[in-house]
Image: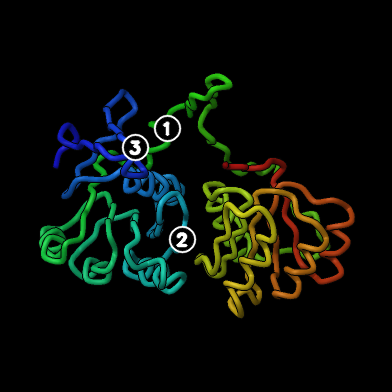
Amino acid sequence: MKLEEIKITTGENESQSASLENNDKTIDYETSKPLSWSDIISILKGLDVISEFYDVKAAVTTTGAGICAVSLGKDILEAIVNTMDSDPIDFMSSVMTLSSEVDSDAAKLLKETKIVVAPKFTKNAKEYFETHGVCYVTINTPLKDYKKYLSNTVLETPLGTLTQTPNLSELDKDNFKVVSKTKPTVEQIEDAVFAWKIAKHASSRAIVVVKDLKTTAVAQGLQSASIEYALDYSCDRSKEAILASDMSITTHDLNVAAQGRISLIILPFASKELIAAADKFNIAIITTGFTNILY
């Protein structure tokens, strides 16, 4: 189904109508099946995240506007398996977005998903998906150019029209600072950057727990207790893991992280009290100098 043929009529709920119209910021893509409003929202979230990792083998699962799991791998098969292992429940019937070509071996791992999004699919992969009723969406626009197509967010409200530019924030060596006595290893810094890029696209208040370039928990959109929720989900996988927060945290939050045996926390800012508490538990702290709040 080519771009000009893709239409939607139903919104988030049956009582809502919807439409999809091309514009000058529309990327080039094709889909094997019609897409719903919710499908498109989930695909967009997956593309937002995968665009951060377009030059490596990466896999992202999303449901609605939520990020379920993200993993990197030496090849796309490993990335898929790692993502499946990270959140096996939400993997079922999810939208899987990948950074590179999907072949028949990868397709066989993805037969339980709802939609697979990738830059390219082999003929055998397409045939397998069609046999098993899995929708596949081909992104013809290079993923490295995806951010160029991001538009301003426009929200029409009874209080007026809200407009804001896309969040194109990147980590800067001048803002990226280790402020604790405990210094991170190279591997921990790689995990910290990985976790930060995911937290950037998760709904606030976001807590992302990562180990070995693989999420073990993603908490987002909660009013409170995000760290407790994330560490409960991560369970024993939080040992020596990295925690990213899109907002500043309290000393109580840090104590919870210490109980979960977190080894490093990356966050926008850290008070003297927070740094002192981190030093007490030999937890490394990295500050970025800015928030990434997403409602």
Q: Position of residue 247 (x, y in %)?
A: 69, 48
Of labels 1 and 2, earlier in sequence is 2
Label 3 vs label 2, nearer the camera:
3
Label 3 to label 2: alpha-carbon separation: 26 Å
Q: Amino acid at mark 3?
A: Gln
Disc ID at residue 16 = 3
In the shown orientation, is residue 244 left or right of residue 276?
left
Q: Residue at x 26, y 49 (%)?
A: 119
The residue at the far top in this view is: 160
Q: Quick one: label 2, few (<14), some, or many (20+) residues within 10 Å?
A: many
Q: Amino acid at mark 1?
A: Leu
Image quadrant where one finds the C terminus:
top right
Q: Residue at x 36, y 43 (%)?
A: 12
Q: In the figure, 10 relative to 130: above or below?
A: above
Of labels 3 and 1, earlier in sequence is 3
* Residue placed most toward the observer, 161 or 85: 161
Q: Which residue is mark 1?
A: 150
In the shown orientation, is residue 249 left or right of residue 210?
right
Label 1 to label 2: alpha-carbon separation: 22 Å
Q: Position of residue 200 (x, y in %)?
A: 56, 47
Image quadrant where one finds the N terminus:
top left
Query: Of helix, strand and loop, which one carries label 2?
Result: strand
